[in-house]
Amino acid sequence: MVKKSWNYLYSLLLSIILLLLVGIFLNLNGNESNVSNNVAVVNKSEHIQEREVQKKELIVSDKRTLLMPDFFDQKSKETPLLNKFLKDRKKDERRAKIAIIIDDIGYQIEIAEQIMSLNYPVAISILPFLSHSQFVAQMAKEKGLTVLLHLPMEPHNANTDPGKGAIFTTMNEHEIKAKILANLKDIPNVDGVNNHMGSKATEDEFIMRTVLHELKERNLFFIDSMTSPHSIGYQLSKEMGLKTAQRTVFLDNEQNIDYIRNQVVVLKNTALKYGSAIAIGHPYCNTVDVLKELESIVEPEGVEIVPLKELLK
């Protein structure tokens, strides 16, 4: 009886153990399946993300492939241009500059045309009341050149006639203003004024203050031709607030071509020494011939021919 009871108990325990083992086994399989499923989901998600990244990289790569040649091509074009700009700017900053004024225009058309056809800017200074004054002034304006009224003024030599429209030291303020108005009416739309002769008048403070006041009212600049070493025109212009400059070299006090060439060298050397210089010449055949050579004389040594307005102060 006892033996049967023991066998029954033993069989029951084995059954319980077996059930426990089966339960454990089934539980492990379930966990592994869940893990596998989770891993599969994670792997699938990572794979999708990886594919998206690759697609983005391909898009970026494609964009880079399209843009890089353009970038380098643009860079290769811009760099020389930038270097040239900087080089030219430095060159312009250090280059000496000269300007040319041709006085006494208005007598002839042909030589005026030659002067205005030069390859560089020339300021044309026109005497009033001559047969071709107005026509030449209009021509110069159409070519974009600087046009000046060549204002006749009294010289020291009483036997020398400065011409129609001249300012004399015996005039009062009203007379001076009337003369200036008449001159500007004959040659309208000028940019500025310089004196014709005037060695006596430009030394007279009353005369010059009256003249310069009228020019300032009309926003005109004044170039002192320096026909007298004692002229006050330039200094007084600065004091009164006018744009101004003064003549440095006369090119053709002698009409000999070698003399004129030598004066060009003086002009060039003065500009190299001081940074700028202004020359005045006249409509003589030899002067025009030398002016045609001017670029080849001055530019190889770093001197630039500029419009007169660039040298105003």
Image (cartoon, rainbow, N blue to C red):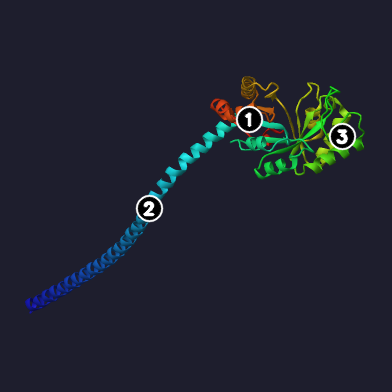
Q: Are marks 1 and 2 in contact (CB under 8 Å)?
A: no
Q: Marks 2 and 3, Cα distance to the nearest angstrom?
A: 72 Å
> Foreground residue, 154 or 211?
154
| Label 1 crowd (10 A; few <14 / some 14-19 / many >=20) | many
Please state which of the two labelled residues, at mark 3 or mark 1, is closer to the viewer: 1
Q: Nearer the viewer, residue 198 or 76?
A: 198
| Residue 126 spot, x, y in % from top left | 74, 36
Q: Which residue is mark 3?
A: 210
Left or right of 8? Residue 194 is: right
Q: Is residue 1 left or right of residue 294?
A: left
Circle 3: element type: helix
279 vs 55: above or below: above
- Which of the 4 image quadrants contains residue 93? top right
Of 130 and 97, the residue lying toward us = 130
Q: Quadrant of residue 199?
A: top right
Locate residue 172, reporting x and y percent.
Answer: 92, 33
| Foreground pick, 155 / 4 | 155
Q: Position of residue 95 (x, y in %)?
A: 59, 29
Mark 2 is surrounded, within 10 Å at the Cα level, by few (under 14), some (14 to 19) or many (20 or more) other residues, namely few
**Residue 218 visible, this angle:** no
Q: Spatial distance from mark 3 to mark 1, Cα to Cα?
A: 35 Å
Q: Which residue is mark 2?
A: 64
Inspect the image, locate mark 2, and give the three-letter code of the amino acid beneath it: Arg
Identify the residue at image location x=78%, y=28%.
234
Q: Circle 1 sits in a helix, a strand or a loop, which is it?
A: helix
Position of residue 98 measured from the top left corner of the image (x, y, whole percent): 64, 29
* Contact (Cβ within 8 Å) of mark 2 with mark 3: no
C-alpha distance separating marks 1 and 2: 61 Å
What residue does disc 1 label?
Answer: 288
Give the foreground label among 1 and 2: 1
Direction from residue 35 to residue 248 in the image, left or right: right
